[in-house]
Amino acid sequence: MELVLSAEDTAFRDDVRAFLKDKLPQEIAAKAGSGFRLSKDDHVRWQKILFEKGWMAPGWPIELGGTGWTAMQKHIFDEECALAGAPMVIPFGVTMVAPVIMAFGTQAQKDRYLPRILRSDDWWCQGYSEPGSGSDLASLRTKAVRDGDHYVVTGQKTWTTLAQHADMMFTLVRTSDSGKQQEGITFLLIDMKSPGITVQPITTIDGSAEINNVFLDDVRVPVGNRIGEEGKGWTYAKYLLGHERTSIAAVGRSKAQLRRLKAIAGAEASGDGTLIDDPDFALRLAQIEIDLLALESLVLRALYAETAGKPPGPEASFLKIKGTEVQQGLTELLVEAVGPYAAPFQPEAFRQDNWNEEPVGPDYAPALAPLYFNWRKASIYGGSNEIQKNIIAKTVLGL
Ligand SMILES: Cc1cc2nc3c(=O)[nH]c(=O)nc-3n(C[C@H](O)[C@H](O)[C@H](O)COP(=O)(O)OP(=O)(O)OC[C@H]3O[C@@H](n4cnc5c(N)ncnc54)[C@H](O)[C@@H]3O)c2cc1C
């Protein structure tokens, strides 16, 4: 089943396809499509190409650099990019901190940061979580003490995705211990080159280096880098998390993964035919495709609401849960499809620049187990799926 597009949307899709064919660097698409890790340069190069076309920030207001696309056009764009193997746009700047700056920042902050985000001049990371303060984020302890026109920040952030590349970090700090925990939190923008910051990599289960500890030791942050009012950071943080969860659904990426799964299942032998004809496997494939289509309808509904000026509410939690279940389900089926050939651990296969050995099994196999292990993260980050269920129980079902 496919969405039926209007003539206008079909023409738009053809424009997007033509742009991708012409401008998406094939070496980047090939790298992403075969599961190789992308470098910072790969991401920034692609984002600058999108900027030149005016397509870097489809969700922004037109006057700030947005595209003015309809919900359906945004959806088509995401899907076509994913199917063509374009790298995902790193969300921390353009879809996470930018809406907060637009809604709550000063004019000086908007003038400084928004154009730099649009041009990918700054790479942002998210400094929310701390050891012991993940789901219970309001218990965070990184302290910011006012000293004239600066805050002096001391503490530790953890799981900070791609902080090793970051120029800026948006972060939550504690400015007061009195009253409710949420009321003592302030939202700061921190320059990652500030003296006193140490970034320490944490290796994930698949052997990759995408998350970090960030230690802050007497880091001086100008008061002008505070978003909104002191002690109101929790309000801004919650606003941002809604945006994070809508984009986490990643329907386009899952469609690309489903296509890959079908190709592999069509190539793998099973009995007298191929795996795709195996009734048990075909049933599981159909089930996940149905889930993906249902998710797509939910995402479109949320996008239309957003276009009508309705900010993402607790429904974003549905998208987070369902989106990540589909992503993880697909990686499980991919591993099962290649059977024992997913087992050899070949981390060097991901360094395309210096790997020229024969893979054990088909060339699509080495990437699949690391992909499976890496995507276990999806039900944890962005607020774990158990926490999303609590949100739904409380705010949607009124339990
Ligand atoms: C790959 C990855 C990237 C990340 N990137 C970032 C980042 O860039 N920036 C950032 O700030 N954070 C990041 N995070 C952190 C992420 O937001 C937290 O891991 C997440 O919020 C869970 O917090 P925790 O790890 O402290 O686990 P805990 O909160 O200790 O939870 C442990 C387990 O208990 C469950 N649990 C906890 N409380 C409840 C409850 N009340 N009811 C039911 N179950 C509960 C959880 O669901 C989980 O299964 C990242 C995490 C991962 C895995």
Image: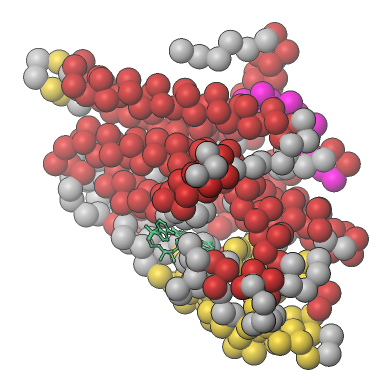
Image: 390 above or below 267: below
Part of the protein shown in magenta: 64-76
Q: Residue 138's spot in the image, x, y percent?
A: 57, 68
In the image, what residue occupies the spot 63% across and 12% down? 5
Residue at the spot x=44%, y=27% of the render? 292
* Residue at the image position 69 percent from the left and 16 percent from the top: 9
In the visual, does 185 lie left or right of 67?
A: left
Left-right relation of 165 to 96: left
> In the image, what residue occupies the spot 59% across and 80% down?
142
In the image, residue 242 lies in the stretch drawn in magenta: no
Task: Residue 121: give x, y in percent of width and height.
Answer: 72, 59
Residue 59 seen anywhere in this rendered image of the structure:
yes
Residue at the outermost left position:
271
- x%, y% of residue 41? 58, 56
Q: Quadrant of residue 341?
A: top left
**Left or right of 333: which side holds 323?**
right
Quarter residue 192 falls in: bottom right
* Residue 74 shown in magenta: yes
Q: Can residue 83 be spotted in the picture?
A: no
Above or below for 234 versus 195: above
Pick the residue in front: 344 or 248.
Answer: 248
Residue found farthest to the front: 399
